[in-house]
Amino acid sequence: MVGWHGAAGEPTVAAVGEFGLIEGLVRQLAEVPAPGVSLSVGIGDDTCAFLPTPGRELLATCDSLVEGRHFLPAFCSPEDVGRRAAAVNLSDVGAMGGQPRFALVSLGLRPETPVAAVEGLYRGLLAEFSPLGVAIAGGNCTAVAGACFVDVTLLGEVEVGRAVLRSGARPGDALLLTGHPGVGAAGLAALQSLGMGNPAPFPVLAGAYRHPRHRAREGRELGLSGRVHAMIDVSDGLLGDVGHLARAGGVGATVEVEALPRHPELLMAADRLGTAPLDWMLGASDDYELLFACAPGDVETLARRVSAVDGVPVTRIGRVEGEPGVWLADGEGGRHPATGGWDHFREPL
Amino acid sequence: MVGWHGAAGEPTVAAVGEFGLIEGLVRQLAEVPAPGVSLSVGIGDDTCAFLPTPGRELLATCDSLVEGRHFLPAFCSPEDVGRRAAAVNLSDVGAMGGQPRFALVSLGLRPETPVAAVEGLYRGLLAEFSPLGVAIAGGNCTAVAGACFVDVTLLGEVEVGRAVLRSGARPGDALLLTGHPGVGAAGLAALQSLGMGNPAPFPVLAGAYRHPRHRAREGRELGLSGRVHAMIDVSDGLLGDVGHLARAGGVGATVEVEALPRHPELLMAADRLGTAPLDWMLGASDDYELLFACAPGDVETLARRVSAVDGVPVTRIGRVEGEPGVWLADGEGGRHPATGGWDHFREPL
């Protein structure tokens, strides 16, 4: 992929050195002021410093991307990786109903990495952070011999006592999901089987893998509503995260398989690659959508409120059960433990 | 080094999986409660959450250690690495005069890493964090194929407007230093030349490399004094960080070479290895001591106050100049630009 390997003579991280690299990045950051951000000490001291907003709790999360594992340089440009590194963390703050504020960026770079690649990575970070008013407040660069890594810590805020936890789901609650599950996994599979193409054969899927969207704004809107009982971002695959939400609340959950939103490209790609769509939709997939539980009476209001943010669809995909466990419902009254997989559902789809 | 490679049959990270590993670490953390810590949301949700102390600013810093670069597994046990990862970040918060509060720990681990090694690493983190009341509030684990990494983000607090910056040094200020410069570099050199030994030939030096001390408590004391004009922790070597402090303040600095505290072991090791002591004392060395500037009239009070914390020596090593630049003074009225190195000083020592 163009971007990770520089042309001969292009400056590398080794050539400019750690301090030269940081100076350049600080200049790049200064060109994109984040609106409404008030750091009292910015990059260049031993730590950054800022004044927390009175009446709010601080939220903190970190997530790292490792080359070859969380991104494949053949498919993801440095800018894609920056966007992904920002998005996965924004997703976590959003899933608490919080407002993201400051990021710290820790990079592990091979000495031969072109400076332009690092600038691209930062462009990607800023492309996601700046529209949300998030400032990059500090970080760290180190040389690595093997795989590059990007570790982002994101700090956010939420009104005291209003963080939306994973643990609050109540029996009888409706389970809702933003977006389309499985597009990340389908995107990776399509890229690996069919390559990048020009144009890409499945642009939505490829984009979902290369630079996944986050729902931080939607999560914040849900947090502000005060009507969400529990929320989690889907980063381990839908069934996995339904299980996390259920276990955290000491409850169970049933997913209505026929209710799951199927993205048209996902169905086409499944057909072309000979894959069962549910393998992508229910199995491991980095989608960074929001899964949340609320009273059945709040479903329509909340769905409307979320979709009003940016047009993201919201689907009621199941319900919370009193009995611990995760089940798949088949639409004809049948219910199957999800632990056994979704083989029951393979034929009819 | 015992600790990084498990015996046959010992559980590995791959065997217990990410979630199994995290569950075990959460149990381990629960056994060491950090006093006075109040997380409103701990490990296990999308983010952690805590209530900042009213009237204080938040400080945030991150620093990563990469195997083979920041630690050599031949010399550093997993516990050593945990201690170092904590110390380098505590050092940064201390250098702002702040109080460390919460840490996030991001690990990149090879699948074959024994679970016991990760537990050892966490023991090391807790050994440094717990006495200061710092709680590990979240983190991330990922698999890597090559070098392991540990990236710690540390959050601290400081009274509003009281962070001690690098930039406040004034011409005429005294320059003070805690501890003994160069022991980290000397320790690495001694270990590389002479091995671990039993007993270690230079135990203080070896310890300074394997698990460097931080001066977070001393830095906090200096911050509370309100009499420190500028401060930085020495992580790039003494002359390098004198230069950082000077440049940040738009001033210069003279270091009195004869005033520098020489650790007896460092002198013995230099003799044995045929190295000039100043190469270690002035050059690159991860010492995590504090370098600070204050009015000449405050030197004695501050030195006494710092040493009262834990017995760490404080030495006046030079002065701040109005003219930008860094110089080495030779005690006979001579002054030499530091940029040319310290060859002038090699003979007489």
Image (cartoon, coloured by chain):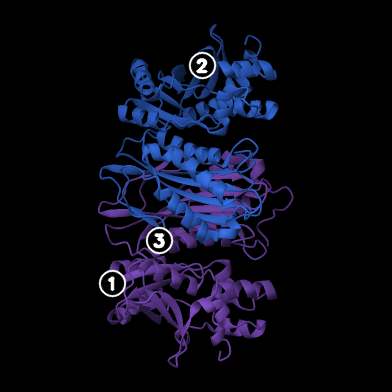
Chain colours: A blue, B purple
Give the chain of mark 3: A
Looking at the rendered structure, the kind of residue marked 1 is Arg
Query: Marks 3 and 2, how far apart in space?
Result: 48 Å
Looking at the rendered structure, the kind of residue marked 2 is Pro
Looking at the rendered structure, the kind of residue marked 3 is Asp
Query: Crowding near pointer 3: few (<14 within 10 Å), some, many (20+)?
Result: many
Q: Which residue is mark 1?
A: B227
Query: Marks 3 and 1, how far apart in space?
Result: 18 Å
Residue at disc 1, secondary structure: loop
Q: Which residue is mark 3?
A: A45
Quadrant of residue A222 in the image? top left
Numbered mark located on residue A73 in the image:
none
**Residue A304, position as x, y percentages in the image:** 35, 18
Give the chain of mark 2: A
Q: Is B31 drawn above or below residue A226 in the view shown?
A: below
**Residue B299, position as x, y percentages in the image:** 32, 80
Q: Is B211 drawn above or below residue B203 in the view shown?
A: above
